Amino acid sequence: MMSQMPQQTALSRCPSCEEPLESGDRFCGACGYDLSAVPAPPGDHPTIAMNGSMPPPPDGAPVMPPAAPPQHPQPPLAGTPQPPFAGSPVSPISGVRFDRPPEPDEYPLQAPDPRVAPDVPTPPDGTKVCVACRAGRVDSDGYCENCGHAQPRERDHMEQDIGPVAAVSDRGLRHHRNEDAFGLGCAALPDGSAAVVAIVCDGVSSATRPDDASLAASRAASEALLASLPHGTHPQQAMHEAIVAASHAVNALADEPATAREHAPHQNAPACTLVGAVVTSGLLVVGWVGDSRVYWVPVDRSTPPARLTEDDSWAAQMVAAGLMNEAEAYADERAHAITGWLGADAYELEPHTASFKPDRPGVVVVCTDGLWNYAEAAEDMAEVVPLDAAARPLHSARVLVGHALDGGGHDNVTVAVVPFPAPSQGAGSA
């Protein structure tokens, strides 16, 4: 019966193909769309969209049926922006979600690193152990094989005290490694008196392996002095020969395979500067190549201190030539460009030596420019050296390094403090 027939919605156009319809059509004559599937319009007409739905069209407008979900949805391509899940409060314009949970006041601690296992076997005796996990072995590159932690370098801060002489070397606050080195020792002269040796070297940072160069030079020079002085070689001649030996040691680094592999045409051979002092009971001998220095600071501070070396540098050359005064030269950005150094690419080796016979006790300060940059004049250096430096050389060296670090520590800092005269007892190689 007609009462059992479904009531048709009055439509003027097919919802599928928009072809005109006639009253009473149950199917579209153009596309065959089932017009009975069109739902009846709601009784009310909301004007606010809820959950992303749109308000119904005005009376008489076609109503689009909901799209059927795909039977086999495909995963989205990588990098394709994804729509938010259904019902999420998302801005239809910006796509920004506003339903993020509130940030917690505290976050849980991260779980322990599984690489740092408590059951890591203890390395054999004599093996260098990681300072971080205390279990892993440190490889040749300075990293822990267990946790990967980089180990502190042994040369970042070094101290040595052998009684009549002491030295301290520090990486400073700006450099990534310490390229300075020092060598200390005591020897007995043929007459039985003591000779104290202090060598300080500063690696040239623009060269290849500057840290190796300074270490090789300091060892070669100090060993040469300690070997020649007991045989009666005059200290000034011994100093000259020690600088030559140090030069040969640095030159040899340029021929090593490790240098050849990393050597590029734009790089220089390993290089460093050197300064040293030999102190006996009545004689003070200094030697140098480069811009590291030796200062004399008397125990009686009423007498003037003195700088005992002349820099192999651009600034020193300008002053010596009378083209600038010292203040102008050392204020120039080219002031610290060195004109003399130890290395295979040095123009010519010119060891400088000088001997002095102080008439009063004092201390000899042997240092790199990492220190004297903060106490350049002899008077400035004397103000920094502690009054009891002759009795406490290690303490004084620490104070001087601390002064440079407090001033900014822009460079590696190395200083040796040697009391004059040398003690009459306790001589022996070290």
Image (tube, grey):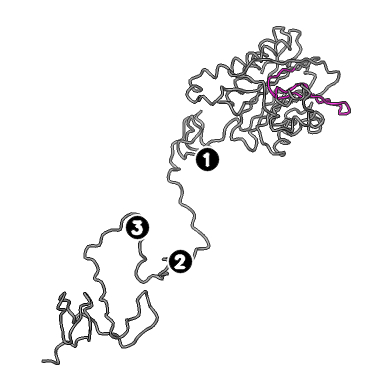
Residue linked to disc 3: 80
- Residue 164 location, x and y as percent? 74, 22
Front tag of 3 and 2: 3
Does 383 sit left or right of 40 as displayed? right
State which tag comes first along the sequence, 1 or 3: 3
Q: Are marks 2 and 1 in contact (CB under 8 Å)?
A: no
The N terminus lies in quadrant: bottom left
Q: Find the magenta span and give its range.
A: 286-313
Q: Residue at 22% across / 86% down in the picture?
A: 10
- Classed neighbour count for the residue bearing mark 3: other residues with Cα under 10 Å, few (<14), some (14–19), many (≥20): few
Q: Which mark is residue 101?
A: 2
Residue linked to disc 1: 132
**Given the image, on which type of amino acid does mark 3 rest?**
Thr
Q: Residue at 61% across / 33% down in the picture?
A: 156
**Given the image, on which type of amino acid does mark 1 rest?**
Ala
Q: CA distance from mark 3 to mark 2?
A: 25 Å
